[in-house]
Amino acid sequence: MKESILITGANGGVGAALVKSFREEDYIVIASDITRKNVECDYYIQQDLALLVGDENIANDFFSEVKKASTDSPLKAIVNNAAIQILGDIKSLDVGDLQKTFNINILAPYAIVKGLHEDLCAHDGVVVNIGSIHAACSKPGFLAYATSKAALKGLSQSLALELGGKVRVNIIQPAAIKTDMLVDGFNDSNKLSELGSMHPVGRIALPSEIADVALFLVSDRSSFITGAVINVDGGISVRLRDPE
């Protein structure tokens, strides 16, 4: 019997790679994002996660749709990939910016796992949270994002304890990933190349490389891995950079 997987943030670069990779491995992919569908998946649920966090009825409708989509294929895994990134320093960021960031990046993953954990428990399920290197080492301007990703790391490890042997929970913490959003943010191609050279492997990650790690963590090959923080960062988190 085929198994289902829920992937949030499915329309982005990493999300699309996740959807493609899991479909190629014969999973039934239930994809979700705030905008209209632009990925090939088995079921699509258009959902604003901020509304899901703030309204119990909306949340229950979302969970009902997921359960309906997985009626004939047990829900095996959830990949919490959706995130927002509001940049700014302590002068420009207000409490509302942090609240919005936390709604999407930390409260929504918790709400989704809470709402669907019984389905996961029934099928030796798996949760994979997509975090960020910013949880461990960040830079100015990423205050809200880095704080939320650090919280997601804590949530992932706490859920691994709470759900014990019933559901495995792990977090992937990537560094720079070659998505359209990142590339478009660099008007100077030399700067993009420089970013790649800062990683000991000499380049930034491909979205498919993040998806490959997620596939492994969902599979039975990782059956003894839970509560783990997987740094998919090309080694940049262990590198010190001297002044030039």
Image: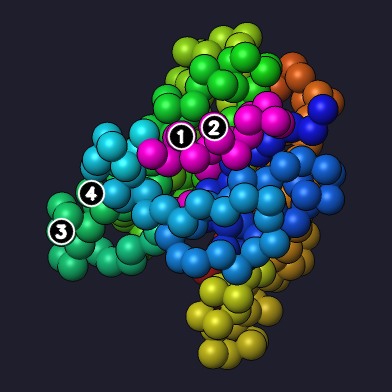
Lateral position of residue 47 relative to residue 18, left or right: left
Q: What is the number of the mark on residue 64?
A: 1
Calculate the distance from the C-alpha at mark 1 to the C-alpha at mark 3. 35 Å
Q: Which residue is mark 2?
A: 67
Q: Quadrant of the C terminus?
A: bottom right
Q: Magenta includes 70?
A: yes
Lateral position of residue 104 relative to residue 241, left or right: left
Query: Given the image, on which type of amino acid does mark 2 rest?
Result: Lys
Quadrant position of residue 75: top right
Query: Given the image, on which type of amino acid does mark 3 rest?
Result: Asp
Q: Is residue 232 above or below residue 230?
A: below
Calculate the distance from the C-alpha at mark 2 to the C-alpha at mark 3. 37 Å
Q: Magenta includes 172?
A: no
Q: Is residue 222 above or below residue 89?
A: above
**Crowd band around label 3 with a 10 angstrom C-alpha radius: few (<14), some (14–19), many (20+):** few
Calculate the distance from the C-alpha at mark 4 to the C-alpha at mark 3. 9 Å
